[in-house]
Amino acid sequence: MKTWLIHHMQALRLVLSRFQKNRLGTLLICLSIGVTLALPSVAYIILDNLNGLVSSVKSESQISVFLTEKHDTALVSGIEKILKQNPAIQNVIFVSKQDALEQLTAIDANKSLLDSLQGNPLPDAFFVEPKMLDATSIESLKNELSKIQGVETVLVDGVWIKRLNSLLFLGKKILIILAGLLGFALIAVIGNTIRMQVLTQSAEIELSRLIGATKSFIRRPFLYVGGLYGLGGGALALMITWVMILFFNQTIKAIANSYQSDFNLHFLSFAEILVVLIISTALGWISAYFSLSSSAKRT
């Protein structure tokens, strides 16, 4: 075990010394990896924040229950009791047609239109907030409410948010494809870099073979090179992503303030940061492994 650790420490020191001698080349390679990884990272943050914003919008789950024109107070009380006792309903608000008319009258743009009407054309209505927000539960509740005596029409609000949910789902698929393609691109870039280093150090590798070095001993430094390239690229990707999120939030904050909202993009959590670093390091190691496998005759 001690010998194994010593061999790994020697390989790591060798790789770090090579990086130090070629700082600019190492930085450029890590920077290219970082820029490539930053693209799916920013896309993930935007989609994740938008998904959280949509989930927090309660209006998407609101169901409007309009009553028939002819009904009495007892019928309204009975419907309200049924709605409040329903286990699938979280909150119930009753708005009489008189209250609805007063709300419309308070808006100046509606006054001329309302003055031309004879009587109050608005119905009494209940506004229901269901507990379950998925489409199946809402549709089931809508059908159940439609069967209540005294209910004329049941409408589900928030169609635009459902469309946005569909777009977000499409965005997630695009993100997966983008991440996959960029992952293959990273494997190609790092693999090609490792292959060039193998060619450059072919004389040193041949000498190591002559003095009895094992295949794992020869390959170990190159595997560390790939892993450290990935780790460095991942760290730079997080820095680039952080700067881009700060830049985006400057504009987003101004837009959100105009809508009396405090929405802004949140950076990755600590666990997500670790995932990015682990994935980038793994991609670098895998790239080096396949590159060495394709150069088996030299290593």
Image (cartoon, rainbow, N blue to C red):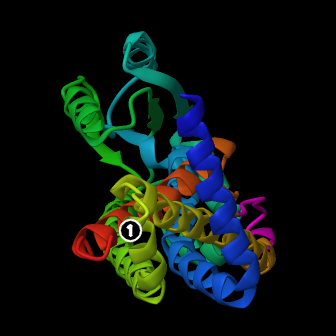
- For the question of whether residue 282 can be seen, the reply is yes
Residue lying furthest front: 211
Q: Position of residue 21 (x, y in %)?
A: 74, 83
Q: Is residue 287 above or below residue 13?
A: below
> Going by the image, does 254 lie left or right of 8?
right
Frontmost residue, 266 versus 115: 266
Q: Position of residue 18 (x, y in %)?
A: 67, 76
Q: Is residue 43 above or below residue 31?
A: above
Quarter of the image with the C terminus is bottom left
Q: Position of residue 13 (x, y in %)?
A: 69, 59
Q: Is residue 155 magenta?
A: no
Task: Tell how many labels.
Answer: 1
Q: Is residue 164 above or below residue 146?
A: below
Q: Position of residue 180 (x, y in %)?
A: 32, 69
Q: Is residue 256 above or below residue 62?
A: below
Question: Looking at the magenta stretch, what is its main secondary structure?
Answer: loop
Q: Residues within 10 Å of mark 1 (few under 14, many from 20)?
A: few
* Mark 1 residue type: Leu
Q: Which residue is mark 1?
A: 210
Q: Bounds of the magenta span?
A: 255-264
Q: Is residue 263 magenta?
A: yes
